[in-house]
Image: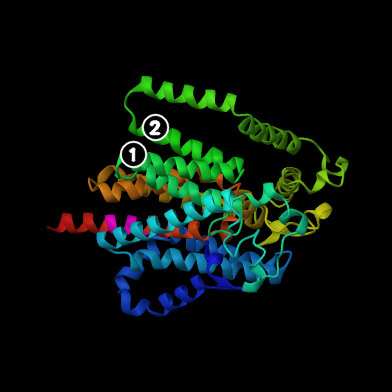
């Protein structure tokens, strides 16, 4: 999403982040900073391990660049609890997020049904005006089918699909008018469907299933909804084709050396490219299980010789395993579980509707993120991921402050 307002490699996000970091002494006390640092202990430990892995990375230049990028994301997580410290702040964040969400939906629908395209987009013919040297192959741009993929304020349709999943979670668990909620949910699911991202669509389905089981008490209604969904899937040939491709993808991962047997045109299809990348990435992770191959090595040409590397692995959790091994992956999982546990604690111990909505929305999305993250180019470059984790950390700190005040009264 950061790329939507940028020129070349300079994003508006970079400027805002720099100004915010400089202003830390004026917006937070030492006690507040220390409290946030303690909450981010696993993240700090993970970043230290990433830094240490520069010693054995396959590409030191790419490794340094990758580390700078994740440090910017980590800085955002650190800043969030220092900037968002009251209920009023959370309301402002949700309202801002709502405006961005509506804008994303409108742009996505326009991109699918018309020739409109956000200028800084993967499929825009004008993105070179904004200092972007990567221009899609002209044959791809000439494809009406490809040009109908919505990208919104994201670079590509996959990232846009995951963004829609985030908004879907917050809308479902919000307390807005039920008909307004239903309308927005339908538009969000429709946009996710237009991206043709199977993992984003499965993520959206899981979010809806979790919501139904949490909020709907009538079990007969639940089974009726499941029946409607299954019937719709059976009748919709496009959905069946989508998931048959997923089955094909999974079967290819289990086949040894399938990629060399493909025709030249087949070998360029995303489904086969990803299956090959996952195969080779798993092999690399098994060869270097403890400390990994070093930061940013998950896209190295030496691991993927038949495709001369990859732009991004498209599997965030596997990317972490390849780069920093079981040590780094274990730290990441501990951080993940800690955040989920703390958010569930906020949800069950607080009676405030606003806090509960934020807590359960973030917790549910984190629960389905391992699946939907397969759609992303890389979680390390996905700004909304860092914003969401930062918001969760801010909520955890705020809820603890409320409890401390209540106990001291």
Q: Residue reaching furthest top?
A: 220
Q: Is residue 346 left or right of residue 329?
A: left
Q: Residue 392 placed where, x, y %?
A: 39, 55
Q: Residue reaching furthest front?
A: 114
- Residue in view at x 50 percent, y 27 percent: 229
Give the Cα distance between marks 2 and 1: 16 Å
In the image, the segment drawn in magenta is 394-399
Instruction: Using the image, determine if residue 164 lies above or below residue 72.
Output: above
Of callouts 2 and 1, which one flags the residue occurring earlier in the amino acid sequence? 1
Q: What is the magenta segment's predominant secondary structure?
A: helix
Between 331 and 20, the residue placed more toward the observer is 20
Q: Residue 114 placed where, x, y %?
A: 58, 52
Query: Can you see residue 371?
Result: no
Query: Can you see residue 79?
Result: yes
Q: Which mark is residue 212?
A: 2
Between 47 and 248, the residue placed more toward the observer is 248
For discs 2 and 1, the disc positioned in front in the rendered view: 1
Q: Residue 84 placed where, x, y %?
A: 32, 64
**396 in the magenta segment:** yes
Q: Say which residue label 1 marks.
A: 179
Q: Is residue 375 left or right of residue 271?
A: left
Number of on-image labels = 2
Judging from the image, what secondary structure is the residue with disc 2 in?
Answer: helix
């Amino acid at each position: 999403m950061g790329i939507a307002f940028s020129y070349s490699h300079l994003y508006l996000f970079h400027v805002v982040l720099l100004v915010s970091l400089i202003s830390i002494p004026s917006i937070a006390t030492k006690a507040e900073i220390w409290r946030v640092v303690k909450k981010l202990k696993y993240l700090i430990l993970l970043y230290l391990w990433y830094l240490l892995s520069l010693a054995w990375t396959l590409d030191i230049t790419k490794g340094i660049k990758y580390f700078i990028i994740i440090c910017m994301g980590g800085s955002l997580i650190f800043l969030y609890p220092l900037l968002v410290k009251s209920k009023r702040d959370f309301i402002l964040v949700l309202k801002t997020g709502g405006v961005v969400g509506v804008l994303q939906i409108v742009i996505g629908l326009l991109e699918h049904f018309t020739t409109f395209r956000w200028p800084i987009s993967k499929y825009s013919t004008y993105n070179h005006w904004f200092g972007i040297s990567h221009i899609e192959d002209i044959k791809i741009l000439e494809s009406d089918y490809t040009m109908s993929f919505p990208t919104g304020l994201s670079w590509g349709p996959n990232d846009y699909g995951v963004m829609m999943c985030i908004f879907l979670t917050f809308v479902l668990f919000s307390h807005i008018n039920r008909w307004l909620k239903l309308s927005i949910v339908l538009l969000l699911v429709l946009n996710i469907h237009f991206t043709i991202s199977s993992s984003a669509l499965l993520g959206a389905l899981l979010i809806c299933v979790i919501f139904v089981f949490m909020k709907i008490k009538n079990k007969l209604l639940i089974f009726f909804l499941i029946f409607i969904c299954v019937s719709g899937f059976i009748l919709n040939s496009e959905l069946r084709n989508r998931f048959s491709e997923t089955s094909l993808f999974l079967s290819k991962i289990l086949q040894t050396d399938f990629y060399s047997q493909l025709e030249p045109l087949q070998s360029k299809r995303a489904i086969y490219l990803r299956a090959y990348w996952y195969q080779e990435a798993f092999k690399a992770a098994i060869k270097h299980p403890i400390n990994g191959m070093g930061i940013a090595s998950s896209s190295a040409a030496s691991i993927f010789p038949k495709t001369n590397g990859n732009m991004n692995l498209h599997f965030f959790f596997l990317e972490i395993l390849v780069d920093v091994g079981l040590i780094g992956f274990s730290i990441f999982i501990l951080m993940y579980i800690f955040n989920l546990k703390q958010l569930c604690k906020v949800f069950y111990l607080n009676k405030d509707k606003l806090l509960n909505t934020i807590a359960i929305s973030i917790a549910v999305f984190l629960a389905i993120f391992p699946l939907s993250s397969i759609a992303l180019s890389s979680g390390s470059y996905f700004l909304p991921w860092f914003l969401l984790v930062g918001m969760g950390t801010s909520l955890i700190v705020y809820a603890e402050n409320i409890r401390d005040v209540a106990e001291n009264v």
